[in-house]
Amino acid sequence: MSAPPAPQPRRRPWLHLFIVGAVGVALAGAAIAFSGWWFFVGRYRLPSIEADEWSPGAPLGTYRIELPSDGRDRYYLLHTPPRSAEPLPPLLVALHGGGSRPEVMPALTGLLAVADREGFVVVLPAGIDGGWNDGRADSGQAAGRQGIDDIGFIRAVVEDASKHALVDMARVFATGISNGAMMSSRLACEASDVFAGIAPVAGTAAEGFESWCRPARPVAVMAFLGTADPLVPFEGGDVGGIFLGRGRGRVVSASDFEAFWSQHNRCERQPRDQLPDADRSDGSRASVEAFVGCTGGGEMAVYVLDGGGHTWPGGRQYLSPRLVGHTNRDLSASELMLQFFKGLRR
């Protein structure tokens, strides 16, 4: 009598499809991020330049400048506009997000094209291991763990850049995304003698910053914050989410951030004004909270992106919306912040 046939393994087509789909999503996200990096590299071949090599007749464009700080090899990128209607143009410090590099910021934000049109000199400093010491406890960034003096480094970057390009030192501003946004908030707290205004994107400030933030003067603030940010919560709390995991420190809510700066700048908040839904396919809607009566150049405006994610409004959708949320396209953060900054001075 012949033996019964051996049992065949049970097919699980759903498991195969799940695995293929998960791998596809991961590869697609990596491809988007990678394409953002190579978009920049393909467009800019950055020469290095030493301080003693610069002259007023040097070619305009983007340069990598080495600037050691506290015994560490550090650098920043300097971008000069093709022309300016003003003899002394303003200076913008643009800070990359955690885990990123300054070379990625132009492709992510479109800032340099707007800066060229508006006549801003732009510097893009590099953080330690891709991050900044923004004041969060246990942020997961090497700069925070090691107590890196990023305030001192960025002060040095501004001073060094002013030797390479003529700039109006009364009109120095800072912006950044995520970890860079929180670092710009710390600059407003501890370097208000240098910075006339900040424009954080997708980030507020470290939880408890109200206890140590002591600006010497009013600081202009324009912020861009998404209500559906999966990494830096709009309502405050733990930074992280599916993309970063836990243990990235805590941040204040958008409302607490607004309250601190409006009180410091003696502003009165106006009702939120919803903006036209210029792009109905972007999964979000923009509105603005304006402030009046601000003193000493401390003007304020907060753009709230209802349904917006951990992204730069008007910039690239650098990863899948499933990971970082939707990029609002009803407005351009780059254009709005530079127009805002252009009329301000310290």
Image: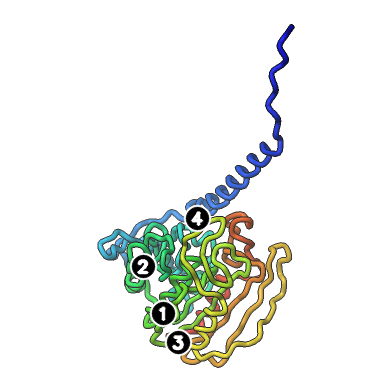
The residues bearing labels 3 and 2 have C-alpha atoms spaced at a distance of: 37 Å
State the residue position of label 1.
Answer: 189
Q: Earlier in the sequence, mark 1 or mark 2?
A: 2
User: Which labelled disc corresponds to residue 40?
Assistant: 4
User: What's under tag 4, amino acid-wise?
Assistant: Phe
The picture quadrant where one finds residue 340 is: bottom right
In front: label 4 or label 2: 4
The residues bearing labels 4 and 2 have C-alpha atoms spaced at a distance of: 25 Å
User: What's under tag 3, amino acid-wise?
Assistant: Pro
Q: Is residue 29 above or below residue 127?
A: above
Q: Earlier in the sequence, mark 3 or mark 1?
A: 1
Query: Under tag 1, what secondary structure?
Result: helix
User: What's under tag 1, amino acid-wise?
Assistant: Cys
Q: Nearer the viewer, residue 62 or 30?
A: 30
Q: Which of marks 4 and 2 is nearer the N terminus?
A: 4
Residue 202 position, x and y percent, is 54, 68
State the residue position of label 3.
Answer: 218
Q: Nearer the viewer, residue 112 or 267?
A: 267
